[in-house]
Image: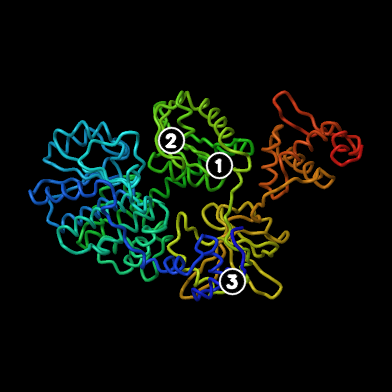
């Protein structure tokens, strides 16, 4: 729990003229003064940072202006995801308005891969390009840029972490450089491109760029899941508003085809409806479709392009659902309870959607996930992780079996030979045990406030919109409650994998609730009072507004557990857990920390020490046997036992 209603919340609420509930949420996020609160609640007041605080910005601007004045051909070299596509589109549009001779190049995801490659650079030089400006890539293309330096100039703009060596480019603009003084280092690739556009526009037009193209910057920023704080919060807030009345013809076509017109566009709708359609082009076909859409000013043409992207996105969704169903079928034969890293492998799975499948499985099982597509004995994989497990570090420690890999701590890609996959799985389990404590495999929720959804009014929910735009480092407000009653449960969605029910009370009040990927919990809804972790939103349909819970967990947030008594009650819970595992053919190993974690996942109170002592007591009483592989099983037909016959039990309970 982060914060509780109290005097501090009441004081901040009075200063900002907001409810104590909203004030408590602000306090939980470190916003504890009127000045901080007003800036957070009014992101339009956040000043844009000086673009020249970015390293090499002056060098970049001077070289680009020289190219424009001399009529040199400029090529914007982008990436095939939504961040790279919006960055390419923004820079293309801005340079065209400044009368530059400019085109663009985005590598093919499958034949070329991410970033600069020598073949593409050679092709561009032969076509007459004299200056390349990278967006959302280039910071690690040291060899590629060095190899082309004698034929053309390169300006790098990127937001990824640099390696040990910077490229020998005319300029390397990246807020993550060690010498950077930029106040907001977490810009997306399109954010860095925006800063470049601000600087060039001011130099050539003698006036600020203001918010020209801010819709593109916001879309790419949301899609790339960078922290929505500081300047990023200003960008996304302004950009989402601009999308609703955009003059960018392609953006208008995109919002229409995605069904995002005639209602406020939020970071959620941008992230779930707009960005996937842009991303789909690079995943399945050609990322150039996204750039063509966002830079075209012909309404008929943009309508055609938007329809094509929509069709590609439908195909992407179909492929993803089919692959995920195959992957989950594989996992039916995996001992999920004792597997820390999930690896699924399919023949000729589409590489463009591997990451989407990995993300979905990670959301369901809360485990690091690697999804591998095999072709002719070579596997291409996409990885998604959970907090506490650095997947990049893990892959680095598996280099004896991995051909290639790249990425960061939360997501990565790899190439591996088919015959190495079994050993790869073993090494990942070793890595997970090394990196993580068992309890880190339990989802951790940072709850803003404990309150029943039945106590939240429509006015309170509408006020919570002041926290928007929400995203990384500024999550949707999260609440919890204990002992509420659920009713009218049913399954919904594809394969009935989602759960729908109502939270009700004796006063006939009710609030609708949805729980994604939780259909297996339907039996719990009417059985007994529920604990919940949830978000609240407003569900609008045909002009009717209703509050709705989006349930994240049907357990109260786990509290820190100190020492617990190994008494009859605890031993009964442990025995029932072991018996149920046996009945369901779920293996149990003599690993007390992991068993305690498994019990806590089921809502039971347990610690490693208590479980270790409990197993010792059961062994002394002859209730369990442990084989040479460390597998525990209950001994049948033992009859009623006297706990005092166990020396360990007597010692722990002061009964010698």
In the displayed structure, would residue 430 be above or below residue 572?
A: above
> Foreground mark, 1 or 2?
1
| Near-viewer residue (601 or 378) | 601
The answer for how far apart the CA atoms under marks 3 and 1 are is 33 Å
Residue drawn at the location 35% of the way across and 49% of the way down = 280
Circle 1 residues within 10 Å: few <14, some 14–19, many ≥20? many
On residue 70, which mark appears? none
Q: Are marks 1 and 2 in contact (CB under 8 Å)?
A: no
Residue drawn at the location 44% of the way across and 41% of the way down = 411
* Horizontal and vertical percent position of residue 114: 32, 39
Name the quarter where the C terminus is drawn.
top right
Residue holding disc 2:
381
| Near-viewer residue (195 or 602) | 195
Of the residues under marks 1 and 2, which one precedes in the sequence? 1
The answer for how far apart the CA atoms under marks 2 and 3 are is 44 Å
Residue 609 lies in quadrant? top right
* Horizontal and vertical percent position of residue 492: 56, 58
Residue holding disc 1:
367
Of the residues under marks 2 and 3, which one precedes in the sequence? 2
Residue drawn at the location 26% of the way across and 40% of the way down = 107
**Relative side of 610 to 130, left or right:** right
């Amino acid at each position: 729990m982060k914060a509780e209603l109290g005097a501090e919340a009441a004081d901040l609420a009075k200063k900002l003229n907001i409810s104590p509930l909203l004030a408590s949420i602000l306090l939980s996020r470190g916003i504890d003064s009127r000045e901080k609160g007003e800036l957070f609640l009014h992101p339009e007041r956040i000043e844009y940072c000086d673009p020249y605080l970015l390293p090499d910005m002056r060098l970049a601007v001077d070289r680009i202006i020289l190219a424009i004045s001399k009529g040199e051909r400029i090529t914007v070299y982008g990436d095939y995801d939504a961040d790279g596509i919006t960055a390419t589109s923004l820079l293309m549009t801005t340079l065209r308005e400044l009368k530059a001779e400019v085109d663009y190049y985005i590598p093919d995801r499958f034949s070329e891969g991410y970033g600069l490659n020598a073949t593409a650079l050679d092709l561009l030089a032969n076509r007459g390009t004299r200056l390349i400006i990278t967006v959302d890539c280039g910071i690690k293309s040291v060899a590629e840029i060095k190899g082309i330096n004698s034929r053309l100039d390169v300006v790098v703009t990127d937001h990824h972490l640099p390696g040990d060596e910077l490229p020998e480019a005319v300029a390397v603009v990246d807020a993550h450089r060690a010498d950077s003084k930029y106040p907001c280092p977490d810009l997306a690739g399109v954010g860095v491109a925006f800063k470049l556009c601000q600087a060039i526009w001011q130099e050539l037009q003698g006036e600020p760029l203001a918010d020209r193209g801010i819709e593109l910057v916001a879309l790419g920023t949301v899609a790339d899941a960078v922290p929505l704080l500081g300047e990023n919060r200003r960008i996304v807030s302004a950009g989402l508003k601009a999308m609703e009345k955009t003059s960018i013809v392609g953006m208008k076509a995109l919002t229409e085809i995605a069904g995002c017109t005639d209602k406020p566009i939020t970071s959620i709708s941008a992230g779930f409806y707009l960005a996937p359609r842009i991303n789909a082009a690079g995943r399945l076909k050609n990322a150039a479709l996204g750039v063509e859409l966002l830079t075209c000013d012909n309404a008929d043409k943009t309508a055609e392009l938007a329809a094509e992207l929509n069709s590609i996105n439908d195909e992407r969704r179909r492929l993803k659902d089919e692959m995920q169903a195959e992957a989950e079928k594989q996992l039916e034969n995996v001992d999920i309870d004792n597997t820390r890293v999930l690896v699924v492998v399919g023949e000729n799975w589409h590489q463009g959607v591997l990451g989407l499948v990995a993300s979905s499985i990670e959301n369901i099982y809360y485990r690091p996930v690697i999804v591998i597509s095999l072709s002719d004995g070579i596997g291409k994989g996409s990885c998604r992780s959970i907090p506490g497990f650095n997947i990049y570090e893990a892959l680095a420690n598996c280099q004896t079996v991995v051909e290639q890999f790249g990425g960061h701590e939360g997501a990565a890609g790899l190439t591996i030979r088919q015959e190495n996959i079994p050993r790869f799985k073993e090494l990942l389990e070793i890595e997970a045990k090394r990196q993580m404590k068992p309890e880190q495999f339990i989802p951790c929720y940072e709850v803003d406030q404990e309150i029943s959804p039945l106590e939240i009014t429509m006015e309170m929910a509408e006020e919570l919109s002041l926290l928007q735009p929400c995203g990384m480092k500024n999550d949707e407000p999260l609440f919890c409650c204990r002992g509420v009653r659920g009713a009218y449960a049913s399954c919904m969605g594809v394969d009935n994998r989602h759960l729908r029910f109502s939270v009700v009370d004796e006063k006939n009040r009710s609030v609708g609730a949805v729980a994604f990927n939780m259909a297996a919990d339907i039996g719990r809804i009417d059985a007994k009072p529920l604990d919940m972790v949830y978000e609240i939103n407003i569900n609008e349909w045909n002009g009717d507004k209703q509050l709705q819970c989006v349930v994240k967990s049907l357990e109260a947030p786990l509290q820190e557990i100190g020492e617990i008594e190994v008494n009859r009650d605890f031993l009964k819970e442990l025995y029932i857990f072991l018996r149920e595992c046996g009945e369901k053919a779920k293996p149990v190993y003599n690993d007390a920390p992991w068993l305690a974690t498994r019990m806590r996942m089921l809502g039971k109170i347990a610690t490693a020490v208590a479980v270790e002592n409990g197993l010792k007591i059961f062994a002394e009483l002859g209730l369990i046997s442990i084989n040479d592989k460390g597998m525990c099983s209950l001994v049948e037909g033992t009859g009623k036992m006297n706990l005092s016959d166990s020396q360990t039990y007597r010692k722990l309970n002061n009964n010698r």
